[in-house]
Image: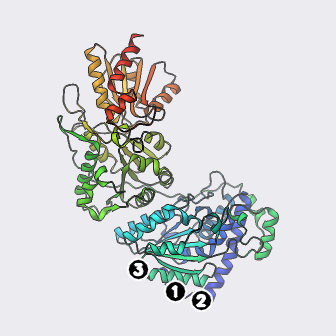
Amino acid sequence: MRRFEKEKLSPEDIEKFENLRKECIRDILTMTTLANSGHPGGAISSLDIYLIVFSYANISPEKVDSPERDKIVISHGHTSAGVYSVLGRLGFFDIDMAIATFRKTGSIFEGHIVRKVPGIEWGTGNLGQGLSAGCGFALADKLHGRDSYTFVLMSDGEQTKGQVAEARRFAIKYGLNRLKVVIDYNKVQISGETEKVMPCRIKENYLADGWGVLECDGHNFSEIYDSLKKAIDIDKPTCIIAHTVMCKGICFLENDYRYHGKPLNVEEYIKAMKEIGLEPVLEKYKKLREKEWNYPEKKFYFFPKIDKGKPIVYGKDEKTDNRTAYGKALLDLARINKDNKEYPIVVFDCDLATSVKTDFFEKEFPERFFQVGVQEHNAATISGAISTDKFIAFFSDFGVFGVDETFNQQRLNDQNFTNLKLVCTHLGLDVGEDGKTHQCIDYIGVIRNLYGFKIIIPADPNQTDRVIRYIIDKEGNWFVGMGRSKLPVILKENGEVFFDENYKFEYGKADLIREGKDGYILTYGCMVYRAIKVYEKLKSDGIDIGILNFSCPTLIDEEKIKIAINTGLLITYEDHHIDTGLASTVGLYLSEKDYSVKFLRFGIKNYGSSGSPDELFKKEKISPEDLILKIKDILKK
């Protein structure tokens, strides 16, 4: 059966759903009472919507991995008990497993929905991100030319969140006409009535942004079905406002906001079962909760087949910024792979293309460049969602926006097993005159909290080029960072290009830039060439200090660091918060290995100000001259 192909629901259909509704209410209350936690109110409120959408959209247990399937995004992930009940009853998995292990340690049936559950497209719980994810899926289907729809099911309370408005505008701009939203408008949220918590003109907001808007009784199966069928025929993004009642069908619970996030006790549970006319099954599932279950497994990552081309080599006298090298590498890769329909490259920007250098790509591939505007949260989620669907997705921004401002979005991306290439420029005091608001000095400390993100900070344009080519076909999430300034090409001691055409980047491996006997500077990014200045000055004074480029600052290359440790002196040197960058990586390693070695940290201890990078480094006492004096002082002792 194709999606919503019936003209109307028959009396038999409605009777089937009425009976199924009672079963699902029992499932929801059994789950939450058994776990002694959960959100029964919203789960029951949204239940009828879930039953119709999952029953008549082009999705089934056999199609959970089909590229042509419809995508259903549950934005209000706290209604998980309702989602699990419907999916289980429709055969996506064993319903007994879901009920018995709801919110149990180790279970995939968590308190908020996760992507490991068959039928779940996007793990949510942080409200307000579901519509952005839906935009990502709808955009992917549109670019692939699929006959698919995306349905985003949402709560009313989250409509006040700014990211929802960002996603509405994106959907209209890019003609995501197969994106359909259903809002559970029960007018109750965890703190009480929505109008008292934070009023929101939901209908007016969607209309103002150009959406189609329909309304229906969210507990009338025929009205829900008719509205969805009508929405599919509307050739623009469409929102259905479904008027509902929290805990509909259980009189003593209806509209009581306390049960939004509070389970029933056993006495209330038994009373509710009597009201819906079904036998309690709590004791059955108490026993099943002790059973060992084999949870279904899903595969998330893909391994794209991409031509990496030949590296661009910047000559010894060529001075450019890493961001330009990134832009050129990205464009080169796009040109080489322009006919690769299976793994297209797409780029997302937030009104900074000329600064982050994705404008090179935009000029030649405008159909795969998406200007999201000053909507960083939305861009982060959309790019993450589309990266799960065989798109090689790049999101580029300044560090303060792409990392600091969107940390929560990147965290949810990471939990959803995305394949995002997050490339941020304008890092550190190297940003210079823009001042402290734009000097992202904590990016390593922030990103290192995300278990699935790998961090690379290249030293010069040549290494930047190799890094971009390296990550292009790698699974998972990658963060590549760089500053603003033009940098000299890193050279070998004999004057030849260090990262030449024969250099191959390998994640986690440090580069031995200069050998030393009296100690080693461990550094990365824009500080590498400054460390070379230190090396040259000290060498002229008879002091032999080596340099290691730790372009992967959260990993230790044990082979290389042992070379440095054997000299007895390690110095981390970075344009980053002194406590959360490379120094913390090295310090933790040394403490765990119990090495006895002198260890000095040179990094940023305060917010910066406006000024040239060199002036700001002097102010922070991390200029090459400051480092030279400190090394000389240490070696005298």
In front of the other: 334 or 199: 199
Judged left or right of residue 258, residue 409 is: left
Task: Please provide percent x and percent y for residue 412.
Answer: 50, 54
Kind of residue at badge 3 = Asp
Would residue 100 appear left or right of 1 to someone viewing this image?
right
Kindly report the distance in space between the C-alpha atoms of the residues bearing marks 1 and 3: 20 Å
Hey, which residue is sitting farthest front in the picture?
Answer: 610
Q: Which mark is residue 235?
A: 3
In primary-sequence order, the first of circles 1 and 3 is 1
Residue drawn at (30%, 23%), measured in percent from left and top?
Answer: 534
Horizontal side, residue 119 vs residue 399: left or right: right
Tell me how far mark 2 sits from mark 3, CA to CA: 27 Å
Q: Residue 375 bears which disc, if any?
A: none
Residue placed most toward the observer, 515 or 116? 515
Mark number displayed over residue 10? 2
- Labels 2 & 1 near each other (Cβ < 8 A): yes
